[in-house]
Image (cartoon, rainbow, N blue to C red):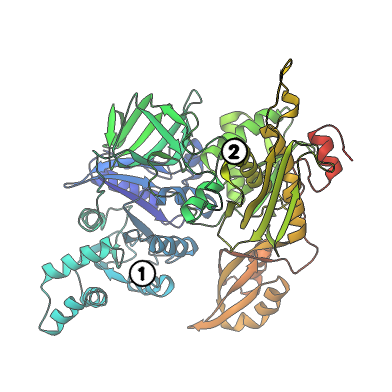
């Protein structure tokens, strides 16, 4: 078994290549067409209408020595979250690049991620039959712009015509690339030459280690070069090596709803076997650690903690009965009673399942490989649209895409969603209309900021003291953490000093409350330490039994924690940071004088300036809120010849204009009076 991802910048021909692979492998009798809306993997009506991939799709085909589970992924950057979820289940990948457009913004982002994760990757330079197609120039651009070792597997002929073909053959460049990573191979070359069989063995070994990347040329439309690519997939990419007899360990990378609204989980099985009527545990399995020890240390644990669901406690991960199972074979999915390691399966019956959950033992950690959404918009229900139905529909969409953050403001009766871009907004609007019958519009898109601590702060409130209306003692200290560290929760009190459920209530409430800092923005990276704890145990009276009104409950700790945390945040201080995009801009060199002042006025900071022929190349950073402004001004400033690539890079302190504030959707612990009125219905003190 081989789980293979097909990745590309939008319109590079990724889905057409998927159709050609299925046809060449004998799975389909006729080629599906993106233009006609007849592709096997674009199953959503919206995908067929727009001619783009929105959701990842799985299809299987056999080769002589291996069965390939092929996963087609979206190419548009607005749907990068779909790609992210697939990366963790891949054995290998094919990165598709257009021979006409060459390296594009998404190409660079994808290759950087594939290299970081060390996923063995073949490159397929598509569309060699199109006018303007290039071969050697694209390889040179790939090497320069992607900075990765490449091995051309042949050359293209009759470029730009329907007669374009791929002629396989390893040239001197292959030996040069492979010898850079193999001293023995280099020594053999210097001693008199390297036999081709040894060269190909080194190629396979280095490709499987993701050291080099073979490059094929072809046309998915005509089929040129595709048989050679298939041979490369079979010979150069590593098949799955899981143990079907071992304990079950699988990772969920996609969740969808069936016709009756039931959840269907797509999972890669790394080891063991899953079957119908099996009871399986799922979830992340992380929770409060030992006294004084960290919770959620390490990137995998932090990612799991960030998406924790209240109620999932150590030793108490949800358990469900598998009621249905299917596997992917010969271009379709077939019902089976059992499926083992290496398979990609669809699982029915696990009602609480979420993207990123592990089935059985935790396997590969689900982590964020790409930046989170940096935009958000308020969803405005149209005439006759029920707000509760709208919120339920958006919640279901967020199940399928965990990076869509749905925020509901009860006070203002409005719901907002996070976004990657305007196309995603249009897709959400169309999906709500087509699948849920809900008419909506959107307000203007705004950027999502974050807050970071500027210092350390601590606060405590004691049970039955001062004006604390809750039967609980909670003390918290907050400290800054490095960007990307996530939220860590620690204990400086003994875990056995009070019931575990009370500690869990504090931790869950801390994590939820950090979604809105002093200015209303999420605080993504910090360490919170519980310094004080206390509760009122149940007390027995001879004639009255237990007095429940005088004993602590989890609600006491959930009610008090936001007040203590907010005071600790006040004492630490926070600073609002806005998202910054890195940019790469190519424009005629003689337009540089007009470009630089405009970029400076929009807050862009060039960090490197160079030339490539007659072009000036600028690289730097620009606030995400100003990217659209740069895009609008660029054509007029560069005679229409400027090309701009942007991608999220980091968050930076807001230095221009007023500090952005975000409306709160909680009970507002910034105002003690308002908070207590909302939570308890009264004000103490």
The residue closer to the viewer here, 164 or 572, is 572
Residue 430 is tagged as: 2
Q: How many marks?
A: 2
Q: 35 left or right of 596? A: left
Q: Residue at x 75, y 28 (%)?
A: 550
Whether residue 382 is situated above or below residue 171 in the rendered picture = above
Which marked residue is nearer to the observer: mark 2 or mark 1? 2
Q: Is residue 46 in view?
A: yes
Mark 1 Cα-neighbour bin, 10 Å: few <14, some 14–19, many ≥20: many
Q: Tell me, yes or no, whether the two marked residues, 2 and 1, touch with CB atoms within 8 Å.
A: no
How far apart are labels 2 and 1 at the CA level?
A: 38 Å
Whether residue 314 is situated above or below residue 155 in the rendered picture = above
Residue indicated by mark 1: 134
Q: Quadrant of the N terminus?
A: top left
Q: Name the spot of residue 86 as percent of width and height, x first.
A: 41, 48
Q: Residue at x 58, y 53 (%)?
A: 488
Q: 638 left or right of 381? A: left
Q: Secondary structure beneath disc 2?
A: helix
Residue 62 is tagged as: none
Q: Secondary structure beneath disc 1?
A: loop
**Image quadrant where residue 174 sits:** bottom left
């Amino acid at each position: 078994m081989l789980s293979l991802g097909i990745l590309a910048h939008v319109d590079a021909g990724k889905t057409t290549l998927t159709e050609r692979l299925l046809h060449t492998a004998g799975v389909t009798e006729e080629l599906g067409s993106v233009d006609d809306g007849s592709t096997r993997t674009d199953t959503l009506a919206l995908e067929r209408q727009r001619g783009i991939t929105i959701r990842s799709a799985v299809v299987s085909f056999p080769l002589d020595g291996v069965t390939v589970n092929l996963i087609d992924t979206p190419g548009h950057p607005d749907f990068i979250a779909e790609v992210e979820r697939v990366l963790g289940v891949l054995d290998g990948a094919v990165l598709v690049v257009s021979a006409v457009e060459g390296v594009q913004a998404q190409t660079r982002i994808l290759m950087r991620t594939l290299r970081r994760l060390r996923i063995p990757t073949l490159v397929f330079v598509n569309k060699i039959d199109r006018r303007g197609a290039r071969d050697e120039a694209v390889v040179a651009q790939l090497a320069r712009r992607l900075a990765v070792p490449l091995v051309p597997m042949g050359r293209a002929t009759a470029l730009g015509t329907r007669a374009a073909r791929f002629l396989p053959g390893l040239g001197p460049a292959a030996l040069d690339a492979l010898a850079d990573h193999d001293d023995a191979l280099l020594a053999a070359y210097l001693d008199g030459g390297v036999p081709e069989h040894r060269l190909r063995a080194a190629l396979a070994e280095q490709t499987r280690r993701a050291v080099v990347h073979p490059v094929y040329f072809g046309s998915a439309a005509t089929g040129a070069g595709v048989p050679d690519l298939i041979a490369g997939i079979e010979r150069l990419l590593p098949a799955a090596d899981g143990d079907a007899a071992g304990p079950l360990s699988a990772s969920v990378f996609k969740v969808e709803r069936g016709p009756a609204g039931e959840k269907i989980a797509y999972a890669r099985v790394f080891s063991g076997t899953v079957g119908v009527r099996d009871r399986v545990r799922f979830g992340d399995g992380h929770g409060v650690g030992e006294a004084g020890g960290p919770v959620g240390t390490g990137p995998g644990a932090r990612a799991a903690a960030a998406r924790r669901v209240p109620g999932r406690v150590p030793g108490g991960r949800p358990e469900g009965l598998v009621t249905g199972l299917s596997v992917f074979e010969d271009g379709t999915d077939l019902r089976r009673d059992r499926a083992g390691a290496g398979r990609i399966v669809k699982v029915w019956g696990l009602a609480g399942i979420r993207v990123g959950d592990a089935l059985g033992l935790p396997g590969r950690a689900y982590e964020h490989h790409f930046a989170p959404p940096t935009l958000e918009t308020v969803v405005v229900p149209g005439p006759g649209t029920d707000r509760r139905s709208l919120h339920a529909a958006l919640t279901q969409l967020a199940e399928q895409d965990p990076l869509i953050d749905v925020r509901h403001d009860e006070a203002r009766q409005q719901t907002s969603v996070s976004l990657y871009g305007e196309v995603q907004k249009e897709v959400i609007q169309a999906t709500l209309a087509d699948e849920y019958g809900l008419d909506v519009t959107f307000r203007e898109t705004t950027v999502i900021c974050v807050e970071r601590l500027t210092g350390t702060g601590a606060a405590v409130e004691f049970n039955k003291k001062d004006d604390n209306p809750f039967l609980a003692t909670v003390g918290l200290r907050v400290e800054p953490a490095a960007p990307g560290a996530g939220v860590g929760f620690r204990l400086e009190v003994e875990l056995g000093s009070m019931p575990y459920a009370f500690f869990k209530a504090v931790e869950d409430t801390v994590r939820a409350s950090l979604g809105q800092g002093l200015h209303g923005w999420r605080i993504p990276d910090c360490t919170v330490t519980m310094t004080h704890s206390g509760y009122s145990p149940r007390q027995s009276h001879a004639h009255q039994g237990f007095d429940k009104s005088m004993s602590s409950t989890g609600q006491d700790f959930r009610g008090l924690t936001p007040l203590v945390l907010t005071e600790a945040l006040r004492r630490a201080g926070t600073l609002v940071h806005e998202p910054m995009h890195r940019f790469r801009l190519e424009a005629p060199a003689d337009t540089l004088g007009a470009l630089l002042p405009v970029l400076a006025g929009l807050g862009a900071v060039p960090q490197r300036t160079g030339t490539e022929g007659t072009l000036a190349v600028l690289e730097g950073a620009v606030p995400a809120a100003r990217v659209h402004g740069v895009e609008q001004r660029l054509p007029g400033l560069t005679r229409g010849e400027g090309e701009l690539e942007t991608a999220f890079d980091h968050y930076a302190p807001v230095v221009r204009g007023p500090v952005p504030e975000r409306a709160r959707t909680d009970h507002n612990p910034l105002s003690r009076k308002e908070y207590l009125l909302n939570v308890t219905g009264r004000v103490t003190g």
